[in-house]
């Protein structure tokens, strides 16, 4: 004899739900994701699942063990199992070992910079070397002597520039000409600085300056002018990111191709040296200009995806994949508890209103209208500032504001069903009011509850993510998808903080919507038709 047998109506609904393949597959996928996240501590954990030490077995992911449990000189503080696993106690003794989770990073663990530096990622920043030189010229603007000024006279045949005419290579405007003539007249003149473009070469610019001049005993025979690279040019830089993997020409900036093969090899050798320790800057040439290449393998948060951290690292140095898995668990558990609690309140309130009617119904409606006018977000801010952000506080507060919608549906169903013959028969037989409400009327009024349940679940997940994004949700250290999206707002270049949490939310919410569509179709007795 079958102890659990479904009634014919329920079997028909299940059959219709299975025929709606998209909803049926989504329900299984959603169930798998829920079970998967419930086992988050077995999948993503910085504490080992099992430890064998000196003939004894330990389960750190379940039970707390102090440092003194493994080290005689240890104290009662929290033990760093990864550091302990690297000691000779475990590396040199085969009987002592640790078994870590497939993703050996906890949701609250800060990744060590040394582990990422071992990945071999080196950032090479090439800064232009400012050019500076000077010339002395006579009254005919003929250069008498020069010092390191040849780069500002590109077509000059001789590096000392002797005998060349300044006016041939650089334009002499009225202000500059007047300043030069004043100095030759041995009159007082203020300092002058101008940025000009070379004559006939629009790509060559320089800052020309004359120092302040005071009258002398004899008029000067030459005037000294200083050339410097313009500020806009000294601010230009090129950045190359080198990993241990072979370089791909498509992944490097265009400036990489302008480097000579010798400079490219020198930069790669410098990056390899930087992985071992510090290295001094080197001089390279990019597009004919001299640059100083600086090597840096320091780690900054957030960090893009690398080997071992497949979804990247957030702004606090925590593994994003671990945060997403644990965050999904918190979101799903919160959503299930919220839906159960809020629907329980809504069912009870709506059932009492609809069953008794009259003054009870009117009074209940007025109270609900007043309650629904209270701003939920302000209440959460007030309670959070008093008691702090807590999981159960958020759940209780949200449940007390989330039941109103379902109470309307239950009230309408009870108002319709309370005058049915089976209810009158139960009254005549002396059945108690509680049994009539919950055993006779409620099973016939349960359709809105079941059809709306998946959509309420999706709404609860989205609401929690929104509250965490605004900073009024779960405590700061609690893994949450909304907190990851909040970090993405402050670090807009960190695309992994935008893509992966959004993708996780999208998949879970989409599956929930598909399940809701399937449940609604299953409870709809009318067959679906399609016009062609």
Image: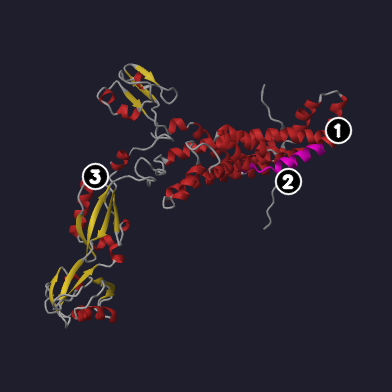
Residue furthest to the front: 217
Q: 487 above or below 73?
A: below
SS type, badge 1: helix
Q: Quadrant of the C terminus?
A: bottom right
Q: Quadrant of residue 235?
A: bottom left
Q: In this image, 75 relative to 452: left or right?
A: left
Q: Nearer the viewer, residue 342 or 387?
A: 387
Left/right placement of residue 499 relative to residue 433 reads left
Q: Upstream in the sequence, badge 2 or badge 3?
A: 3
Residue at the (59%, 40%) spot, across then down = 381
Instruction: Measure the alpha-carbon separation of dots 2 and 3.
Output: 69 Å
User: Image point 81% across, 26% down: which residue?
Assistant: 433
Q: Is residue 154 above or below residue 116?
A: below
**Image spot of residue 155 (x, y percent):** 18, 76
Say whether residue 424 is visible.
yes
Q: Is residue 32 visible?
A: no
Q: Residues within 10 Å of mark 2 (few under 14, many from 20)?
A: few
Viewer-proximal residue among 357 and 279: 279
The residue where tag 1 is placed is 421
| Magenta stretch: includes residue 485 | no
Query: Which of label 2 and label 3 is nearer to you?
Result: 3
For the point 47% across and 44% down, the residue is 484
The image shows residue 246 at horizontal and vertical percentages of 26, 50
The image quadrant that residue 82 belongs to is top left
Region rendered in magenta: 361-377
Kindly report the secondary structure that dominates the magenta region of the rendered protein: helix
Please give the residue where the numbered disc 2 appears in the rendered image.
526
- Which residue is label 3 attached to? 275
């Amino acid at each position: 004899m079958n102890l659990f047998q479904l009634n014919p109506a329920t079997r028909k609904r299940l059959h219709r739900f299975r025929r709606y393949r998209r909803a049926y597959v989504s329900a299984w996928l959603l169930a798998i994701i829920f079970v998967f996240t419930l086992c988050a501590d077995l999948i993503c954990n910085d504490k080992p699942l099992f430890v064998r030490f000196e003939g004894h077995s330990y389960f750190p992911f379940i039970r707390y063990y102090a440092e003194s449990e493994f080290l005689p000189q240890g104290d009662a503080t929290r033990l760093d199992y990864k550091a302990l696993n690297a000691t000779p106690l475990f590396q040199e003794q085969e009987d002592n070992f640790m078994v870590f989770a497939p993703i050996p990073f906890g949701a609250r663990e800060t990744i060590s910079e040394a582990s990422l530096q071992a990945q071999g990622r080196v950032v090479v920043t090439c800064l232009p070397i400012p050019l500076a030189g000077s010339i002395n010229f006579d009254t005919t603007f003929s250069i008498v002597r020069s010092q390191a000024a040849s780069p500002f006279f590109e077509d000059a045949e001789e590096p000392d520039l002797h005998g060349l005419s300044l006016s041939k290579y650089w334009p002499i405007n009225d202000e500059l000409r007047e300043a030069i003539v004043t100095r030759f007249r041995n009159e007082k003149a203020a300092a002058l600085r101008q940025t000009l473009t070379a004559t006939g070469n629009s790509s060559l610019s320089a800052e020309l300056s004359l120092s302040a001049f005071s009258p002398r005993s004899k008029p000067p025979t030459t005037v000294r002018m200083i050339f410097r690279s313009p500020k806009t040019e000294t601010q230009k830089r090129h950045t190359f990111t080198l990993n241990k993997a072979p370089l791909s020409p498509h992944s490097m900036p265009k400036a990489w191709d302008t480097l000579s093969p010798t400079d490219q090899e020198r930069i790669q050798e410098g990056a390899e040296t930087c992985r071992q320790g510090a290295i001094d800057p080197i001089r390279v040439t990019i597009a004919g200009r001299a640059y100083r290449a600086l090597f840096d393998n320091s780690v900054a948060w957030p960090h893009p995806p690398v080997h071992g951290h497949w979804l990247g690292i957030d702004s606090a140095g925590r593994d994003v994949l671990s945060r997403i898995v644990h965050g999904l668990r918190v979101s799903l558990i919160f959503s299930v508890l919220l839906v159960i609690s809020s629907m329980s309140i809504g069912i009870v309130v709506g059932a009492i209103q609809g069953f008794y009617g009259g003054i009870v119904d009117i009074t209940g409606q007025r109270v609900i209208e007043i309650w629904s006018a209270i701003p939920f977000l302000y209440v959460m801010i007030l309670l959070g500032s008093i008691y702090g952000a807590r999981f159960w506080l958020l759940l209780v507060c949200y449940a007390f504001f989330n039941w109103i919608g379902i109470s309307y549906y239950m009230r309408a169903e009870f108002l319709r069903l309370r005058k049915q013959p089976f209810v009158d028969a139960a009254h005549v037989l002396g059945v108690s009011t509680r049994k009539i409400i919950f055993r006779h009327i409620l099973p016939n009024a349960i359709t809105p509850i079941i059809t709306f349940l998946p959509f309420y679940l999706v709404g609860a997940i989205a609401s929690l993510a929104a509250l965490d994004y605004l900073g009024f949700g779960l405590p700061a250290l609690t893994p949450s998808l909304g907190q990851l999206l909040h970090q993405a707002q402050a670090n807009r270049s960190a695309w992994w903080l935008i893509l992966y949490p959004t993708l996780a939310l999208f998949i879970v919410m989409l599956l929930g919507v598909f399940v809701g569509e399937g449940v609604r179709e299953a409870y709809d007795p009318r067959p679906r038709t399609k016009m062609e």
